[in-house]
Image (spheres, helix red, strand yellow):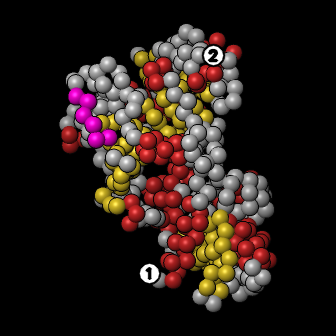
């Protein structure tokens, strides 16, 4: 591995530490190198906090070293506009850095710059100041890390993750509807960690009634609290459910078809739930919510990434509409059997196996690719369970569309 890649991968690993705290901003990491050694490093730790470049420069200064003539490796093009924080380009120029190695371009530079009266993107500002730049080192890894950021920039939609737990024969519930617990405690801890990294968690009203979930990351070390979204096509959560009883403390959205609202919404609104009327799937199906209308609304509310937890009907609706980007399946070493037992993904489905949706890439051991450069299928264990993760879409295409 060349030194350039080694330093950029160090910056990418730093950037990943901001996951779940920086959104809607991207994750960014930076290292400063002088004389073949890293003399400072930093990452964007939370939305509204200093950017990675600023943290790295401060780290050098804290260590009593100087930045003049040094080189910086940063995972995203530095900003040249003022937002929550001042322009990073100003700090870089002031620090006297000689050269910047940048992994990937900022797809939003134009919108941010125009809004803040800045004519030039970060790259141009640095070049005008006499700072040499080189872009593209570990670019694909940087894009994969910030897949949600690039999807928002490309399609004006949040990233959609589908998660489910199933038995080895593909059941998410027995023929009587029993589903607790399919996966083991190790898997459930991982789910709580995932919940702490997303903006919203989506379930159907049927799942809300049957399982009475809380949908928090209560066992996680993450401090992010996701909005809870319940799709209420024909039913609504019970007034004494965990979701409703905590609605005044944790944002709880009840999405329903505007043409055919179910009964009971007004009472739940009084208890703190937020009502969200949405366009129906079709005029012939007035009681079904169109997935795209929900995604558009959540995007407008600032969501970067969403987690769909079920049930089968909701997962099937989003899968049929091709709105799922990434899949995380927890597979327990259990057999449920029964023709009437629910499978993970309902909906219309496909006619022929040749039309099945395929996870992209090759199957790898996740530990072998901490910073994947392309969509891969990863398999690992959690206790006795198997976790299968993969992408249905390629984030690199979102990046390409922003150029």
Is any part of residue 114 visible from this angle? no
Range of magenta residues:
332-337
Q: Is residue 333 left or right of residue 241?
A: left
The residue carrying mark 1 is: 1
What x and y, as percent, mark residue 160? 48, 42
Residue furthest to the bottom: 35
> What residue is shown at x 34% (from left), y 45% (from top)?
385
Rounded to the nearest angstrom, the CA distance separating label 2 from label 1 is 58 Å
Position of residue 311 relative to residue 26, above or below, is above
> What residue is shown at x 56% (from left), y 42% (from top)?
219
Q: Is residue 137 left or right of residue 33?
A: left
Q: Secondary structure at mark 2?
A: helix
Position of residue 114 relative to residue 138, above or below, is above
Label at residue 268: 2
Position of residue 4 relative to residue 104, above or below, is below
Magenta highlight on residue 334: yes
Magenta highlight on residue 348: no
């Amino acid at each position: 591995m060349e030194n350039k890649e080694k330093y950029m991968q160090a910056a990418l690993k730093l950037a990943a530490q901001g996951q779940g705290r920086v959104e809607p901003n991207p994750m960014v990491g930076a290292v400063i190198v002088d004389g073949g050694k890293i003399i400072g490093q930093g990452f964007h730790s939370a939305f509204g906090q200093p950017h990675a470049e600023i943290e790295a420069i401060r780290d050098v200064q804290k260590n009593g070293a100087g930045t003049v003539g040094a080189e910086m490796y940063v995972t995203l093009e530095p900003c040249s506009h003022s937002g929550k924080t001042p322009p990073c380009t100003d700090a870089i120029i002031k620090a006297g850095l000689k050269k910047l190695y940048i992994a990937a371009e900022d797809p939003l530079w134009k919108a941010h710059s125009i809004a803040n009266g800045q004519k030039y993107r970060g790259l141009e500002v640095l070049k005008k100041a006499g700072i040499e730049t080189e872009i593209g080192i570990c670019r694909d890894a940087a894009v994969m890390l910030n897949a949600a950021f690039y999807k928002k920039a490309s399609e004006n939609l949040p990233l959609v993750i589908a998660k489910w737990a199933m038995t080895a024969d593909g059941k998410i519930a027995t023929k009587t509807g029993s589903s607790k617990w399919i996966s083991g405690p190790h898997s459930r801890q991982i789910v709580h960690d995932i919940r702490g990294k997303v903006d919203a968690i989506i379930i159907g009203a049927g799942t809300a009634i049957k399982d009475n979930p809380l949908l928090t990351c209560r066992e996680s070390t993450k401090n992010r609290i996701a909005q809870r979204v319940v799709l209420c096509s024909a039913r609504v959560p019970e007034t004494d459910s965990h979701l409703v009883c905590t609605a005044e403390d944790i944002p709880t959205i009840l999405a329903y078809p505007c043409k055919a609202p179910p009964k009971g919404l007004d009472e739940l609104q009084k208890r703190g739930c937020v009502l969200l009327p949405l366009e129906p799937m079709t005029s012939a199906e007035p009681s079904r919510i169109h997935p795209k209308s929900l995604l558009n609304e959540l995007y407008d509310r600032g969501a970067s990434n969403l987690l769909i937890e079920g049930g089968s009907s909701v997962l099937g609706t989003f899968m049929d509409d091709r709105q799922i980007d990434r899949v995380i399946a927890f597979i327990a070493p259990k057999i449920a059997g029964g023709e009437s037992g629910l499978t993970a993904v309902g909906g219309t489905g496909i006619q022929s196996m040749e039309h099945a949706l395929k996870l992209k890439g090759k199957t790898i051991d996740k530990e072998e690719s901490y910073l994947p450069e392309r969509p891969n299928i990863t398999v690992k264990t959690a206790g006795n369970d198997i976790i299968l993760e993969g992408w249905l879409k390629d984030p690199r295409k979102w990046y390409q569309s922003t150029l």
